[in-house]
Image (cartoon, rainbow, N blue to C red):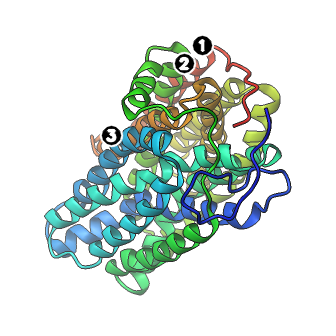
Amino acid sequence: MAHPTAVAPGRGHRSAALGGDTAPVVAPLTVVGTAALLVVMQLYLAIPLAPVVGADLGGAGTTALNTAYGLAYAAGFLVWGPVSDRFGRRVVLIPGMVALTAATAGLALVSSLVMVGALRAAQGFIAASFAAVAIAYLGEALPPRWRTTGIGVVSTAFLVAGIAGQVYAQGVVLALGWRWVFALAAAAFAVIAVLMALLLGEPARQGAPASLGQRFSQMAGLLTRREMTWPYLAALTVLLAFVALYTALGPLLQTRFGLAGDDILLVRLAGLPGMALAPLAGTLAGRYGPPRVAVTGFLTAAVGLIMTALTSGVLWGLVAGSAVFVAGIATAVPSLIALVSSNAGPARAGAIGLYGLALFLGASTGPIVAGIGFGFTSLLLCLAAILLVAAGLVAASPAPARSTDRG
Protein backbone atom coordinates (compact mmCIF):
# COMPACT_ATOMS: atom_id res chain seq x y z
CA MET A 1 0.00 0.00 0.00
CA ALA A 2 1.40 3.41 -0.93
CA HIS A 3 2.05 5.76 1.94
CA PRO A 4 0.40 9.21 1.77
CA THR A 5 2.59 12.24 1.37
CA ALA A 6 2.85 15.20 3.68
CA VAL A 7 1.12 18.51 3.14
CA ALA A 8 1.00 21.70 5.12
CA PRO A 9 -0.83 21.18 8.37
CA GLY A 10 -3.62 23.56 9.11
CA ARG A 11 -5.49 22.98 5.86
CA GLY A 12 -9.06 21.90 6.23
CA HIS A 13 -9.17 19.22 3.53
CA ARG A 14 -8.12 15.63 4.06
CA SER A 15 -4.37 15.33 3.98
CA ALA A 16 -1.53 13.37 5.47
CA ALA A 17 0.17 15.66 7.92
CA LEU A 18 3.06 13.33 8.58
CA GLY A 19 2.59 10.49 6.16
CA GLY A 20 5.92 10.33 4.30
CA ASP A 21 8.96 8.78 5.97
CA THR A 22 10.82 12.09 5.56
CA ALA A 23 7.98 14.25 6.84
CA PRO A 24 8.62 16.28 10.00
CA VAL A 25 7.43 14.42 13.07
CA VAL A 26 9.14 15.86 16.13
CA ALA A 27 7.13 19.07 16.50
CA PRO A 28 3.67 17.53 15.99
CA LEU A 29 4.56 14.55 18.17
CA THR A 30 5.78 16.90 20.90
CA VAL A 31 2.51 18.83 20.78
CA VAL A 32 0.37 15.68 20.90
CA GLY A 33 2.50 14.15 23.66
CA THR A 34 2.37 17.32 25.76
CA ALA A 35 -1.38 17.60 25.22
CA ALA A 36 -1.78 13.96 26.29
CA LEU A 37 0.02 14.69 29.55
CA LEU A 38 -1.94 17.88 30.31
CA VAL A 39 -5.34 16.47 29.38
CA VAL A 40 -5.09 13.26 31.38
CA MET A 41 -3.64 15.11 34.38
CA GLN A 42 -7.12 16.62 34.77
CA LEU A 43 -8.44 13.26 35.94
CA TYR A 44 -5.81 12.66 38.60
CA LEU A 45 -5.58 16.15 40.06
CA ALA A 46 -8.91 15.42 41.75
CA ILE A 47 -7.21 12.99 44.16
CA PRO A 48 -5.44 15.69 46.25
CA LEU A 49 -7.93 18.45 45.32
CA ALA A 50 -11.13 16.78 46.55
CA PRO A 51 -10.69 17.47 50.30
CA VAL A 52 -9.43 21.01 49.66
CA VAL A 53 -12.30 21.99 47.36
CA GLY A 54 -14.83 20.27 49.61
CA ALA A 55 -13.60 22.21 52.63
CA ASP A 56 -13.71 25.52 50.74
CA LEU A 57 -17.14 25.09 49.14
CA GLY A 58 -18.79 23.05 51.89
CA GLY A 59 -19.34 19.37 51.22
CA ALA A 60 -17.65 16.26 49.88
CA GLY A 61 -15.53 17.12 46.87
CA THR A 62 -14.89 13.57 45.65
CA THR A 63 -18.16 13.13 43.76
CA ALA A 64 -18.07 16.58 42.17
CA LEU A 65 -14.41 16.50 41.19
CA ASN A 66 -13.65 12.87 40.52
CA THR A 67 -16.73 10.76 39.85
CA ALA A 68 -18.51 13.36 37.69
CA TYR A 69 -15.39 13.82 35.58
CA GLY A 70 -14.57 10.12 35.32
CA LEU A 71 -18.03 9.02 34.22
CA ALA A 72 -18.36 11.82 31.65
CA TYR A 73 -14.83 11.14 30.42
CA ALA A 74 -15.67 7.47 29.94
CA ALA A 75 -18.90 8.33 28.11
CA GLY A 76 -17.01 10.71 25.83
CA PHE A 77 -14.87 7.85 24.58
CA LEU A 78 -18.00 6.21 23.18
CA VAL A 79 -18.85 9.32 21.17
CA TRP A 80 -15.62 10.87 19.96
CA GLY A 81 -13.98 7.77 18.51
CA PRO A 82 -16.73 7.07 15.95
CA VAL A 83 -17.17 10.80 15.27
CA SER A 84 -13.49 11.13 14.38
CA ASP A 85 -13.63 7.91 12.34
CA ARG A 86 -16.41 9.53 10.29
CA PHE A 87 -15.44 13.20 10.08
CA GLY A 88 -11.69 13.19 10.65
CA ARG A 89 -9.22 13.47 13.51
CA ARG A 90 -8.27 17.13 13.22
CA VAL A 91 -11.84 18.43 13.23
CA VAL A 92 -12.35 16.71 16.59
CA LEU A 93 -8.97 17.43 18.19
CA ILE A 94 -8.77 21.20 17.67
CA PRO A 95 -12.34 22.33 18.49
CA GLY A 96 -12.25 19.92 21.41
CA MET A 97 -9.14 21.59 22.81
CA VAL A 98 -10.75 25.03 22.45
CA ALA A 99 -13.86 23.86 24.32
CA LEU A 100 -11.69 22.22 26.98
CA THR A 101 -9.94 25.54 27.53
CA ALA A 102 -13.27 27.24 28.23
CA ALA A 103 -14.58 24.52 30.57
CA THR A 104 -11.32 24.44 32.53
CA ALA A 105 -11.25 28.23 32.89
CA GLY A 106 -14.80 28.11 34.22
CA LEU A 107 -13.71 25.80 37.03
CA ALA A 108 -11.42 28.51 38.35
CA LEU A 109 -14.48 30.73 38.90
CA VAL A 110 -17.05 28.37 40.45
CA SER A 111 -18.86 29.21 43.68
CA SER A 112 -20.52 25.89 44.59
CA LEU A 113 -19.96 22.15 44.42
CA VAL A 114 -22.93 21.85 42.07
CA MET A 115 -21.13 24.10 39.59
CA VAL A 116 -17.93 22.12 40.13
CA GLY A 117 -19.75 18.88 39.33
CA ALA A 118 -21.43 20.30 36.22
CA LEU A 119 -18.25 21.82 34.82
CA ARG A 120 -16.14 18.78 35.70
CA ALA A 121 -18.63 16.59 33.82
CA ALA A 122 -18.44 18.93 30.82
CA GLN A 123 -14.65 19.04 31.10
CA GLY A 124 -14.43 15.25 31.23
CA PHE A 125 -16.69 14.71 28.22
CA ILE A 126 -14.75 17.26 26.17
CA ALA A 127 -11.33 15.98 27.32
CA ALA A 128 -12.23 12.57 25.91
CA SER A 129 -12.30 14.17 22.45
CA PHE A 130 -8.52 14.32 22.68
CA ALA A 131 -7.76 11.11 24.53
CA ALA A 132 -10.03 8.96 22.34
CA VAL A 133 -8.56 10.28 19.10
CA ALA A 134 -4.87 11.00 19.77
CA ILE A 135 -3.56 7.43 19.46
CA ALA A 136 -5.63 6.77 16.34
CA TYR A 137 -4.34 10.04 14.86
CA LEU A 138 -0.70 9.09 15.41
CA GLY A 139 -1.29 5.58 14.09
CA GLU A 140 -2.49 7.09 10.81
CA ALA A 141 -0.47 10.29 10.53
CA LEU A 142 3.04 9.23 11.49
CA PRO A 143 5.37 7.49 9.04
CA PRO A 144 5.34 3.72 9.65
CA ARG A 145 8.73 3.64 11.33
CA TRP A 146 7.62 6.35 13.80
CA ARG A 147 4.26 4.87 14.77
CA THR A 148 5.44 2.63 17.61
CA THR A 149 7.49 5.51 19.01
CA GLY A 150 4.58 7.93 18.72
CA ILE A 151 2.09 5.65 20.42
CA GLY A 152 4.70 4.92 23.09
CA VAL A 153 5.15 8.64 23.74
CA VAL A 154 1.41 9.21 24.16
CA SER A 155 0.97 6.08 26.27
CA THR A 156 3.82 7.22 28.52
CA ALA A 157 2.25 10.67 28.82
CA PHE A 158 -1.09 9.11 29.79
CA LEU A 159 0.68 7.14 32.52
CA VAL A 160 2.95 9.91 33.79
CA ALA A 161 -0.18 12.04 34.14
CA GLY A 162 -1.30 9.72 36.93
CA ILE A 163 1.57 10.92 39.12
CA ALA A 164 2.11 14.36 37.58
CA GLY A 165 -1.54 15.36 38.00
CA GLN A 166 -1.41 14.69 41.73
CA VAL A 167 1.94 16.43 42.20
CA TYR A 168 0.92 19.44 40.09
CA ALA A 169 -2.35 19.93 41.95
CA GLN A 170 -0.81 19.55 45.38
CA GLY A 171 2.07 21.89 44.54
CA VAL A 172 -0.17 24.62 43.11
CA VAL A 173 -2.59 24.37 46.04
CA LEU A 174 0.27 24.86 48.49
CA ALA A 175 1.70 27.80 46.52
CA LEU A 176 -1.32 29.63 45.06
CA GLY A 177 -4.62 27.99 46.02
CA TRP A 178 -6.84 25.43 44.31
CA ARG A 179 -8.45 27.77 41.76
CA TRP A 180 -5.07 28.33 40.15
CA VAL A 181 -4.86 24.61 39.39
CA PHE A 182 -7.56 25.15 36.76
CA ALA A 183 -6.54 28.66 35.70
CA LEU A 184 -3.01 27.59 34.80
CA ALA A 185 -4.30 24.47 33.05
CA ALA A 186 -6.71 26.55 30.95
CA ALA A 187 -3.86 28.79 29.81
CA ALA A 188 -1.82 25.74 28.82
CA PHE A 189 -4.75 24.29 26.85
CA ALA A 190 -5.15 27.56 24.96
CA VAL A 191 -1.51 27.40 23.86
CA ILE A 192 -1.90 23.74 22.86
CA ALA A 193 -4.99 24.56 20.77
CA VAL A 194 -3.04 27.15 18.78
CA LEU A 195 -0.09 24.80 18.25
CA MET A 196 -2.38 21.99 17.13
CA ALA A 197 -4.03 24.27 14.58
CA LEU A 198 -0.61 25.21 13.22
CA LEU A 199 1.10 21.82 13.25
CA LEU A 200 -1.47 19.05 12.86
CA GLY A 201 -2.89 18.08 9.49
CA GLU A 202 -5.56 15.53 8.63
CA PRO A 203 -4.30 12.00 7.83
CA ALA A 204 -5.30 10.65 4.43
CA ARG A 205 -8.07 8.03 4.41
CA GLN A 206 -8.41 4.97 2.21
CA GLY A 207 -11.79 4.53 0.51
CA ALA A 208 -15.10 6.30 1.06
CA PRO A 209 -15.89 7.27 4.66
CA ALA A 210 -18.55 5.19 6.41
CA SER A 211 -21.60 6.90 7.89
CA LEU A 212 -21.70 7.77 11.57
CA GLY A 213 -24.31 5.07 12.10
CA GLN A 214 -22.01 2.51 10.51
CA ARG A 215 -19.18 3.66 12.77
CA PHE A 216 -21.30 3.11 15.88
CA SER A 217 -22.38 -0.27 14.51
CA GLN A 218 -18.73 -1.19 14.03
CA MET A 219 -18.05 -0.21 17.63
CA ALA A 220 -20.95 -2.30 18.91
CA GLY A 221 -19.73 -5.22 16.83
CA LEU A 222 -16.39 -5.13 18.65
CA LEU A 223 -18.18 -6.15 21.84
CA THR A 224 -19.21 -9.45 20.29
CA ARG A 225 -15.59 -10.53 19.77
CA ARG A 226 -13.83 -12.35 22.59
CA GLU A 227 -10.41 -11.04 21.57
CA MET A 228 -11.77 -7.54 22.27
CA THR A 229 -14.08 -8.01 25.26
CA TRP A 230 -11.61 -9.84 27.47
CA PRO A 231 -8.94 -7.13 27.20
CA TYR A 232 -11.68 -4.55 27.84
CA LEU A 233 -12.66 -6.35 31.05
CA ALA A 234 -9.00 -6.41 32.06
CA ALA A 235 -8.73 -2.67 31.32
CA LEU A 236 -11.46 -1.98 33.89
CA THR A 237 -9.06 -2.99 36.64
CA VAL A 238 -6.02 -0.90 35.68
CA LEU A 239 -7.01 2.59 36.81
CA LEU A 240 -9.45 1.24 39.39
CA ALA A 241 -6.43 -0.16 41.23
CA PHE A 242 -4.26 2.90 40.54
CA VAL A 243 -6.77 5.50 41.70
CA ALA A 244 -7.91 3.41 44.68
CA LEU A 245 -4.33 3.01 45.90
CA TYR A 246 -3.45 6.69 45.65
CA THR A 247 -6.79 7.78 47.11
CA ALA A 248 -6.12 5.63 50.17
CA LEU A 249 -2.42 6.47 50.33
CA GLY A 250 -2.73 10.16 51.25
CA PRO A 251 -4.79 9.65 54.44
CA LEU A 252 -2.54 6.74 55.46
CA LEU A 253 0.59 8.86 55.15
CA GLN A 254 -1.02 11.53 57.31
CA THR A 255 -2.42 9.30 60.06
CA ARG A 256 0.21 6.54 60.30
CA PHE A 257 3.38 8.44 59.49
CA GLY A 258 2.43 12.04 60.32
CA LEU A 259 3.40 13.30 56.86
CA ALA A 260 1.95 16.40 55.24
CA GLY A 261 2.44 18.76 52.32
CA ASP A 262 5.80 18.35 50.61
CA ASP A 263 6.50 14.97 52.24
CA ILE A 264 3.34 13.42 50.77
CA LEU A 265 4.22 14.97 47.43
CA LEU A 266 7.61 13.23 47.50
CA VAL A 267 6.00 9.86 48.25
CA ARG A 268 3.68 10.32 45.27
CA LEU A 269 6.70 11.14 43.10
CA ALA A 270 8.34 7.83 44.02
CA GLY A 271 6.22 6.04 41.45
CA LEU A 272 7.38 8.26 38.59
CA PRO A 273 10.53 6.29 37.61
CA GLY A 274 8.41 3.21 36.96
CA MET A 275 6.61 5.10 34.21
CA ALA A 276 9.81 4.92 32.16
CA LEU A 277 8.92 1.30 31.41
CA ALA A 278 6.01 2.34 29.18
CA PRO A 279 8.04 2.95 25.97
CA LEU A 280 10.01 -0.24 26.63
CA ALA A 281 6.74 -2.13 27.03
CA GLY A 282 5.70 -1.04 23.54
CA THR A 283 8.95 -2.40 22.11
CA LEU A 284 8.61 -5.66 24.04
CA ALA A 285 5.01 -6.02 22.88
CA GLY A 286 6.22 -5.86 19.29
CA ARG A 287 8.76 -8.59 19.97
CA TYR A 288 6.94 -10.97 22.31
CA GLY A 289 3.31 -10.09 21.63
CA PRO A 290 1.02 -7.71 23.55
CA PRO A 291 -0.77 -10.42 25.59
CA ARG A 292 2.44 -11.78 27.11
CA VAL A 293 3.75 -8.34 28.04
CA ALA A 294 0.37 -7.21 29.40
CA VAL A 295 0.13 -10.32 31.60
CA THR A 296 3.63 -9.59 32.92
CA GLY A 297 2.52 -6.05 33.74
CA PHE A 298 -0.58 -7.19 35.61
CA LEU A 299 1.40 -9.76 37.60
CA THR A 300 4.06 -7.17 38.48
CA ALA A 301 1.41 -4.68 39.59
CA ALA A 302 -0.26 -7.33 41.75
CA VAL A 303 3.08 -8.19 43.37
CA GLY A 304 3.64 -4.48 44.05
CA LEU A 305 0.28 -4.19 45.79
CA ILE A 306 0.99 -7.26 47.91
CA MET A 307 4.40 -5.81 48.87
CA THR A 308 2.77 -2.50 49.78
CA ALA A 309 0.08 -4.23 51.84
CA LEU A 310 2.56 -6.37 53.79
CA THR A 311 5.00 -3.51 54.48
CA SER A 312 2.50 -0.67 54.98
CA GLY A 313 3.77 -0.11 58.52
CA VAL A 314 7.23 0.79 57.21
CA LEU A 315 7.52 3.89 55.04
CA TRP A 316 10.35 2.65 52.83
CA GLY A 317 8.52 -0.62 52.21
CA LEU A 318 5.35 1.23 51.27
CA VAL A 319 7.26 3.45 48.85
CA ALA A 320 9.11 0.51 47.28
CA GLY A 321 5.95 -1.55 46.88
CA SER A 322 4.04 1.31 45.28
CA ALA A 323 6.94 1.87 42.86
CA VAL A 324 6.78 -1.80 41.77
CA PHE A 325 3.00 -1.46 41.36
CA VAL A 326 3.37 1.61 39.14
CA ALA A 327 6.01 -0.16 37.04
CA GLY A 328 3.56 -2.99 36.46
CA ILE A 329 0.78 -0.62 35.45
CA ALA A 330 3.20 1.18 33.11
CA THR A 331 3.92 -2.15 31.45
CA ALA A 332 0.30 -3.29 31.17
CA VAL A 333 -1.28 -0.15 29.70
CA PRO A 334 0.70 0.22 26.43
CA SER A 335 0.47 -3.53 25.87
CA LEU A 336 -3.32 -3.47 26.24
CA ILE A 337 -3.51 -0.54 23.82
CA ALA A 338 -1.40 -2.49 21.32
CA LEU A 339 -3.59 -5.57 21.78
CA VAL A 340 -6.83 -3.64 21.24
CA SER A 341 -5.47 -1.67 18.27
CA SER A 342 -4.09 -4.71 16.49
CA ASN A 343 -7.42 -6.55 16.73
CA ALA A 344 -9.67 -3.62 15.82
CA GLY A 345 -9.34 -3.50 12.03
CA PRO A 346 -10.72 -0.31 10.43
CA ALA A 347 -12.60 0.73 13.60
CA ARG A 348 -9.38 1.69 15.38
CA ALA A 349 -10.63 4.86 17.05
CA GLY A 350 -13.87 3.17 18.06
CA ALA A 351 -11.90 0.31 19.60
CA ILE A 352 -9.69 2.74 21.50
CA GLY A 353 -12.88 4.51 22.58
CA LEU A 354 -14.25 1.34 24.14
CA TYR A 355 -10.88 0.74 25.76
CA GLY A 356 -10.98 4.25 27.21
CA LEU A 357 -14.54 3.68 28.42
CA ALA A 358 -13.41 0.59 30.33
CA LEU A 359 -10.24 2.25 31.61
CA PHE A 360 -11.94 5.35 32.97
CA LEU A 361 -15.02 3.60 34.30
CA GLY A 362 -12.46 1.86 36.46
CA ALA A 363 -10.84 5.19 37.34
CA SER A 364 -14.16 6.72 38.39
CA THR A 365 -14.86 3.65 40.54
CA GLY A 366 -11.47 3.79 42.27
CA PRO A 367 -12.35 6.45 44.89
CA ILE A 368 -15.58 4.61 45.70
CA VAL A 369 -13.70 1.34 46.24
CA ALA A 370 -11.10 3.12 48.38
CA GLY A 371 -13.86 4.58 50.56
CA ILE A 372 -15.66 1.31 51.30
CA GLY A 373 -13.77 0.91 54.57
CA PHE A 374 -11.79 -2.27 54.05
CA GLY A 375 -8.69 -0.93 55.74
CA PHE A 376 -5.52 -0.21 53.78
CA THR A 377 -4.02 -3.71 53.84
CA SER A 378 -7.26 -5.50 52.98
CA LEU A 379 -7.98 -2.98 50.21
CA LEU A 380 -4.63 -3.60 48.55
CA LEU A 381 -4.93 -7.39 48.78
CA CYS A 382 -8.37 -7.21 47.15
CA LEU A 383 -6.98 -5.01 44.39
CA ALA A 384 -4.11 -7.45 43.86
CA ALA A 385 -6.62 -10.29 43.46
CA ILE A 386 -8.54 -8.24 40.87
CA LEU A 387 -5.34 -7.65 38.89
CA LEU A 388 -4.58 -11.38 38.94
CA VAL A 389 -8.01 -12.02 37.43
CA ALA A 390 -7.23 -9.40 34.77
CA ALA A 391 -3.97 -11.18 33.97
CA GLY A 392 -5.94 -14.39 33.48
CA LEU A 393 -8.38 -12.67 31.13
CA VAL A 394 -5.59 -11.36 28.92
CA ALA A 395 -3.75 -14.68 28.97
CA ALA A 396 -6.91 -16.50 27.85
CA SER A 397 -7.82 -14.04 25.10
CA PRO A 398 -6.86 -14.86 21.49
CA ALA A 399 -3.49 -13.59 20.31
CA PRO A 400 -3.67 -10.33 18.31
CA ALA A 401 -4.08 -10.76 14.59
CA ARG A 402 -1.07 -9.66 12.60
CA SER A 403 -2.20 -6.99 10.18
CA THR A 404 -0.46 -5.66 7.12
CA ASP A 405 -2.44 -2.45 7.32
CA ARG A 406 -0.14 0.43 7.94
CA GLY A 407 -2.73 3.15 8.05
Is residue 403 visible in the rendered image? The answer is yes
Do the numbered discs 1 and 2 sit on residues whose CB atoms are within 8 Å?
A: yes
- Cα–Cα gap, marks 1 and 2: 5 Å
Within 10 Å of the Cα at label 1, are there few (<14), some (14-19), or many (20+) other Cα atoms? some
- Cα–Cα gap, marks 3 and 2: 21 Å
Name the residue that disc number 1 marks: 396
Q: Which mark is residue 369?
A: 3
Q: Nearer the viewer, residue 401 or 386?
A: 401
Give the percent coordinates (x, y) of residue 316. Answer: 61, 56
Please name which of the two marks, 1 or 3, marks the residue nearer to the observer: 1
Q: The N terminus is located in which quarter? A: top right
Do the numbered discs 1 and 3 sit on residues whose CB atoms are within 8 Å?
A: no
Q: Earlier in the sequence, mark 3 or mark 2?
A: 3
Q: Earlier in the sequence, mark 1 or mark 3?
A: 3
129 up-or-down from 50: above or below: above
Q: Residue at x 28, y 42 (%)?
A: 373
Query: Which amino acid does the dot numbered 2 rest on?
Result: Leu
Q: The C terminus is located in which quarter? A: top right
Give the percent coordinates (x, y) of residue 54. Answer: 21, 67
Query: Which amino acid does the dot numbered 3 rest on?
Result: Val
Name the residue that disc number 2 marks: 393
Label 1: element kind: helix
Q: Nearer the viewer, residue 402 or 250?
A: 402
